[in-house]
Image (spheres, helix red, strand yellow):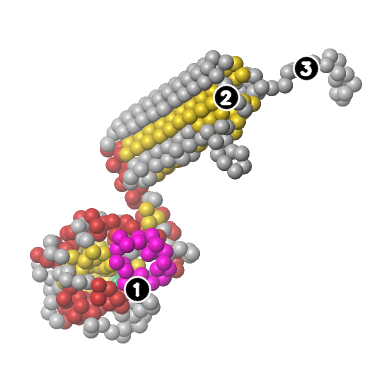
Amino acid sequence: MEKTVAVVLAAGEGKRMKSNYSKVVHKVCGKPIIERVTESVKKANIEKCILVVGHKKEQVMELLGESVGYAIQEEQLGTGHAVMQAVPLLGDAKNVVILCGDAPLITEETIKEVISINEKEGRAATIITANFDNPTGYGRVIRDAKGAVKAIVEEKDATADEKKVTEINSSMYCFDKEALCSALGKLTNNNAQHEYYLTDVIKIMIDENKKVDTYIVKDKSEIMGINNRVQLYEASEILKKKINTMHMLNGVTIISPDNTYIEEGVQIGKDTIIYPGTILEKNTIIGENCVIGQNNRITNTIVGNNTEIISSVLIDSKVGNNTHIGPFAWLRPNSNVGDNIRIGDFVEIKNSNIGNGTKVSHLTYVGDSDIGENVNFGCGTVTVNYDGINKHRTVVGNNVFIGCNTNLVAPVKLGDRVYTAAGTTVTDDVPDDALVIGRCRQEIKNGWTKGKIKGC
Ligand code: UD1
Ligand code: MG
């Protein structure tokens, strides 16, 4: 493959998204539309990628930074005009691939294929096309009696007969750079929309007896463009299905793939079962033989083997083997939960290490803490980590028994084998093997309620 540069058209307004954000920064399966396009470009081994930006360009430029080059199209005067803005940046490339910033499903295979065909056949242009049952709205590929491409005609400029053609222009192409630049110089905006159509470049080339043909894409979804939220959903569904199918073929049971959302970066071990309503995001890794029960959201978290997680939220955390989480637990960032642990209902853990064999079964907050092994938390324990200005750590040794409704006022340290009486507020460090009681002694006033309780 000779030197190739990619030009991605992303200056359009995207009105139909009805959004304050640029259309191309909206996400499909967790990743911005435009980033999917530029990633496919990179995977196709094209080093230079130029984005034509205009509407809400700051958002696009902030997202992609210096990973790509930019050509600014101040006024959106058509797709041909957009490509003209990138011409000064094309350099010494032989091939120019044009892609749409709003068509995120294009693959590196198709990009490589179209470059290879254009080069091998010595063409001036190869247009990526597809046959659509309903071609309404698209530019149609018009062929002569022998089947050779004559032109691309836009819907608004098409005759009734031309409108019947089902082969549509994807608005993605591979051009020979010299032929493209020469034809761009001859474009006019003499059409229904008074725009400089990139599609007219094709007719100009053919009139000059240059070789032009199409590449009919194998999977039509690759050229799907996103113009509104319904199409955003449709593209996400296509990707979701691909990802879930891949995991199932790798040995993961997904009870209801339609109701399971897994992003691309996620890895899952074999014999793990995923129940409906689960969302696995970013670089989450789930081990083998786990049960990921209903309605979990697990983001950027590493989970070991044989672990069960039900109806919980886990973010930027780590969970070991044979551990049980949930229902209704929340692991906030930097929670490191070991092996053989039980984290039960309405338990919140944040920025803490929980040692192996520990049980935090109900209604407990563990924040900024280092908890040893085989600790038993009674119901309603709170690590009091925040004094209004600073956060402080709680350190708990091994084999500690924490009674119900204990407050551990940080900074505080409990040794090994400590026992806290229920209802205790611990404010000072407790040595190994001690019992700590910090609560009012119970008083009984016999007969005190007589005459004070209605009807008694
Ligand atoms: C274009 C094609 C049409 C094709 C269709 C596929 C032309 C004239 N028509 O039509 O044949 O079937 O795409 O979806 O090329 N853009 C700019 N600057 C502009 C205009 C557009 O950057 O001045 C960008 C848009 O952001 C978008 C892409 O170019 O990513 C396509 O533009 P759009 O207005 O959607 O073109 P269509 O009318 O759909
Ligand atoms: Mg369009």
- Residue 185 at what x, y percent from top left? 23, 83
Q: Residues within 10 Å of mark 1 (few under 14, many from 20)?
A: some
Residues under numbered marks 1 and 3 in contact, where contact means CB atoms less than 8 Å apart: no
- Residue 168 at what x, y percent from top left? 27, 67
The tag on residue 184 is none
Magenta stretch encompasses residue 276:
no
Gap in Å between the C-alphas at discs 2 and 3?
28 Å
> Disc 2 residue type?
Asp
Quarter of the image where one finds residue 383: top right
Q: Which residue is mark 1?
A: 72
The residue positioned 51% from the left and 35% from the top of the image is: 368
Secondary structure type for disc 1: strand
The CB of the residue at mark 3 lies under 8 Å from ligand 1: no
Q: Nearer the viewer, residue 139 or 254?
A: 254
The residue positioned 57% from the left and 24% from the top of the image is: 429
Secondary structure type for disc 3: loop
The range drawn in magenta is 51-71
In the picture shown, does residue 89 fall above or below 101? Answer: below
Quarter of the image where one finds residue 83: bottom left
Q: Point out the image quarter for the C terminus.
A: top right
Q: Mark 1 or mark 2, which is nearer to you?
A: 2
User: Quick check: 67 left or right of 47?
Assistant: right
> Disc 3 residue type?
Glu
Q: Which residue is mark 2?
A: 429
The tag on residue 443 is 3
In the picture shown, does residue 129 fall above or below 291? Answer: below
Q: Nearer the viewer, residue 202 or 411?
A: 411
The CB of the residue at mark 1 lies under 8 Å from ligand 1: no
